[in-house]
Image (cartoon, grey):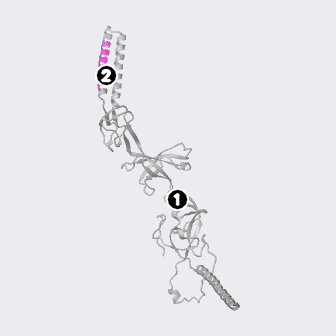
Amino acid sequence: MIKRFIIALIFLVLVCGGIVGFNIFRDKAIKQYFANMPVPTTTVSSQTVEPITWSPSIEALGTVSASQGVDLTVESAGIVKEIRFAGNEQVKVGSVLVQLDDAVQQADLAAAKTQAGLDQTTLERASVLQKRGVGSDVTVDSARAASQASTSQVAKLQALLDQKQLRAPFSGTIGIRKVDIGQYVSPGTIVATLQDLETMYVDFSVPEQQLNLLRIGGPARFGLTGEDMPFTGKIIGIEPKIDPVSRLVKVRVEVSNPEGKLSPGQFVQARVLLPEENNVVALGQTAVVSSLYGDYVYVIRPADKDANGRQAAAGKSDAKPATNGAVSSAEAAEPAKPEALVARQVFVKTGRRSSGLVEILSGLQPGDKIVTAGQNRLSNGSPVAIDNTINPANPAQPEPAAK
């Protein structure tokens, strides 16, 4: 019995020892495999850092309005008798747009004119009699006062009659009518909108820190998107007061709109163009990576150089012993291997951003080759290969694919 127990114990020890030994061997083999596994080369696109002509700008969101635009209303109450316009029709200044029923006013005006004519005749007779010495000055003065009152009454009734007509205050495009023939309208009823679409205003606001960059007459561009800005204009007004709540200042730009592509109330993106600057280091925004520690880029360096371009610490020498100047035919026939490249992380200080570019204030030098796409797969020192057949960076720096 004891002998069987000893044999079972020995067998159990051997089994447990084998399992433990196998696990230790497996873990060591896995570590060696991953330690010796080559790091895969990542294909990236690149851009060479070169000073460019920087065209700074101020981006904003604006609203379009007409240089002249009103909602037309009637001045007096009445029944709509005629509508003399159609929607989106071009009308001239002074043209009659709506005619209200004015029969009563016409009759009153005719009576007033008749009375004015009678009073004028009475005044002329009184003046003749006064010259003959028959009439008195009081009679002439009374006749003159009556004539002037009649003339004023005619002018008043003519003004009331004119209020029965709605005329265009300026030339422009009239909108959809909002009244119908036979409808009773009261003062203030909106008939239609009239807009002068030849010249438009774009109003937008900029931060107070950029106020000193603006000037009257400065150029600006506008469009529905930041990539397509076909409309150009110039600054005609800068609000002298800064909003104390938002800390923004309002700017107005005048834009020519001969084709009528802009409409009042439309939303547009505005870009105020500032004077160009030379020798500015700028990159496409895709090249700059933001992190909690700051902005950085990946600079492509030879594998034997560090992030600053200095020669890295020497490792094992790959030089072969000299052969008295003789080179074997196998070595001569062997093609030259491409230079090994790695991506080095370099922190940079960024400045202004405009048109997909970001200004680099420090951290890079002209001639540095930086990664513009593929950074999400990189870490400091990762081997890279350059392929610029598709480069999302700023197209100002296109480069052919590296061979």
- Of the two numbered discs 1 and 2 on the same chain, state the one appearing first in sequence: 2
Structural distance between the alpha carbons of marks 1 and 2: 78 Å
- CB-based contact (under 8 Å), mark 1 and mark 2: no
Amino acid bearing label 2: Ala
| Residue 388: % across, % down | 47, 70
Q: Pick the residue in front: 165 or 310.
A: 165
* Secondary structure found at label 2: helix
Residue 328 visible to an observer of this rendering: yes
Specify whether residue 360 is painted magenta.
no
Specify whether residue 111 is painted magenta.
yes
Relative side of 9 to 367, left or right: right
Q: Give the range drawn in magenta.
A: 107-126
Vertical placement of residue 16 versus 70, above or below: below
Vertical placement of residue 333 versus 122, above or below: below
Q: In which quarter of the image is the N terminus?
A: bottom right
Q: Pick the residue in front: 174 or 19.
A: 19
Amino acid bearing label 1: Asn
| Residue 65: % across, % down | 42, 45
Q: Residue under label 1, please give it.
A: 278
- Circle 2 packing at 10 Å, graded few (<14), some (14-19), many (20+), is many
Most common SS among magenta residues: helix
To which quarter of the image does residue 73 belong?
top left
| Residue 187: % across, % down | 38, 33
* Secondary structure found at label 1: strand
The residue sitting at 56% across, 50% down in the picture is: 209
- Circle 1 packing at 10 Å, graded few (<14), some (14-19), many (20+), is few
Name the disc covering residue 112, or none: 2
